[in-house]
Image (cartoon, rainbow, N blue to C red):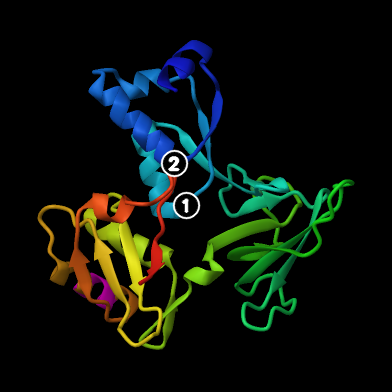
Amino acid sequence: MAAQIEYLKPDAMVAYPNLLERMAVVVEAEGKDLRRILRPVQHIWWGGARLNKELRSLMGEQFDVEIHEHFGIGDMGFHAMDCAGQDGAHFQDDRFFIENLNPDRLEPQDLEIPGELAITALQDESMNYVRWRTEDLGIVKTDPCECGRTSPRVVIFGRVWERTKVDGAVILPHNIESVLLRLFGHESPFQILRSRDGQDPVRLRIAIQSGFDPATVEEAIRSELGITLPVESVTADVILAGSPAYKYRQVVDV
Ligand SMILES: [Zn+2]
């Protein structure tokens, strides 16, 4: 991948996050300068895993590029991509129709209330995708965007099945991710563990950074999210085991 970038010198790339991280490791092992290789690249469109503001900023600094998000569904193709305003991904409303479903009742609701996004393809002639449930939990913004485009913007918070109730509050992985990024200063793999029968309390396992301990993480979560989550320290290999190459599961039922 790095050799291709050096040869083609693209202005922009579409890439999966873990492939980028892998490339960074390989390039460093070869004694090369990643920033020099990526110098022609000004924008990277990130896909396949959700991105929050803190992670976007960190990845942008690491690769010295502007990071954008895009969303798509394997069967239907890309449907949304963000702009320089980075306040939601502009939805292609000339090609698709979007609805927001109440996650419990599956009835359409106001676009700006967090719900499951459902998409109908308007141009597919050979296959009908009607009210296709994306399993993405998010909102659709319709207020004016600073870039001047008038299409609605999609903001994704997580997957519907990732909603986890702790101490009466519903949390998503991005809530935990934000706490850990602030605490450690960079990304750290973690998993929310739920018991299938709901008998055991929800807990968290984390590849804790050196200099920190589970009690510190528990306190940060308690003070920022107002919930109590027992934290277990594991190696990153334990969390990444069995995951696909480009993302890992942040919520697991055990
Ligand atoms: Zn915009």
The stretch in magenta equals: 219-223
The rendered magenta stretch, by its main secondary structure, is classed as helix
Q: Say whether marks 2 and 1 touch (CB < 8 Å).
A: yes
Q: Farthest residue toward the right?
A: 125
Give the image location of residue 172, x and y in percent: 44, 69
Q: Is residue 185 visible?
A: no
Circle 1 SS class? loop
In the rendered image, the vertical position of residue 60 relative to residue 87, given as above or below: above
Of the numbered discs 2 and 1, the one sitting upstream in the chain is 2
Image mark for residue 19: none
Which residue lies at the image location 28% right of the left edge and 49% below the top edge?
186
Give the image location of residue 21, x and y in percent: 36, 37
Residue behind mark 1: 51
Q: Say few, some or many: other residues with alpha carbon within 10 Å of mark 2 (under 14 / 14 to 19 / 20 or more).
A: many
Which residue lies at the image location 67% right of the left edge and 62% below the top edge?
141
Q: Is residue 31 left or right of residue 202?
A: left
* Badge 1 amino acid: Leu
Residue behind mark 2: 17
In the rendered image, the vertical position of residue 83 relative to residue 226, given as above or below: above
Q: Determine if the magenta segment contains residue 113.
A: no
Where is the C terminus found, in terms of image quarters? bottom left
Give the image location of residue 128, x and y in percent: 84, 55
For this rendering, which residue is in front, 241 or 152?
241
Q: Is residue 91 left or right of residue 64?
A: right
In the rendered image, the vertical position of residue 248 relative to residue 168, given as above or below: above
* Badge 2 amino acid: Pro
Cα distance, mark 2 to mark 1?
A: 9 Å
Where is the N terminus found, in terms of image quarters? top left
